[in-house]
Amino acid sequence: METLEELVAQRKGYKYLSKDGVSPYQDFQYNLRSKKIMRFPLDEHPEHDCGEGCNLATLKWIADNCLKLDGVIVECTIPENAKIIVPHKSDGKFRTDAIRFSKIHKVESAFPALKGFQKHLAAYKPINPIQTEEMPAPDKIKPILLRLRNQVRNQVRNQVRDQVGDQVGNQVRNQVWNQVWNQVRDQVGDQVRDQVRNQVRDQVGDQVGDQVRNQVGDQVRNQVWCIAYYAIKLFMNLPYEHPAFDLIRLGVIAVNVLGKFKIFGKGGKFLGEFDESEVK
């Protein structure tokens, strides 16, 4: 992909617009079919990072700042007599007083790593993996509990997010992550929260008293997040593994309360418990 310097030398640049031609920053609507030269008032002061004019950018800048999968990438040429202002602190954006649209690219043609991703995402159906109705065998669940820690959410998040970047490339990692995060994570998370979280928290509160309800809520909340990250792992076919995922594969949620691991399954059903001293 071209650098800022290469684009300026070629007198061209790119804009991200909605599929209807609307700018994400000024809500200005362009006619995507126009082949005429468009002219704009221009802020000619390069010490201004932003200013009047038609702002263009590198594809990398677009990917880092405003790209969404349902828009278009407009390739623009800059007439020979037009002025080009590159801000002193530019990280890929510049402005000019005249452009002509030369090509309209679909996002996945400008960013090949995204090919087929939108269709794959649209077809996604969330599944709540917490479906077990009987206590898993002790020799299966105890080793997992031994490896788990109470707080795993950030560790899992960072590793899953990094592997998304490895798969699609760091250039579009943020856009893919945001789309998957908003759809896959939210849908699975909502389903698990509705079907499991409150039931687990309430049952533990009934068993050991309201004084530990908040502690339990935090643990369950972290596991709901991990279930959402597990859904992203499956959706993106990522190789990352974590003991929290092994617990999810058993179809259970575990909370550690007053020295006991309490195990819950489908619909928040209480399946049984282990004394913490047994998990070693």
Image: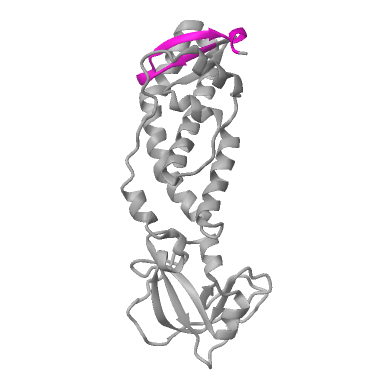
Where's residue 39, x and y in %?
A: 46, 85
The answer to whether residue 162 is seen in the rendering is yes
| Quarter that holds the C terminus | top right
From this view, report whether residue 189 is shown above or below residue 16: above
Range drawn in magenta: 261-279
The one nearer the camera, 249 or 85, is 249
From this view, report whether residue 194 is shown above or below residue 178: above
From this view, report whether residue 271 is shown above or below residue 27: above
From this view, report whether residue 257 is shown above or below residue 51: above
Q: Residue shown at 46%/60% (left/top)? A: 113
* Quadrant of res 35: bottom left
Where's residue 251, x and y in %?
A: 41, 23
* Quadrant of res 153: top right
Verify whether residue 32 appears in magenta.
no
| Quarter that holds the N terminus | bottom right
Q: Colour mode?
A: one colour
Is 242 on the left or on the right of 114, as rendered? right
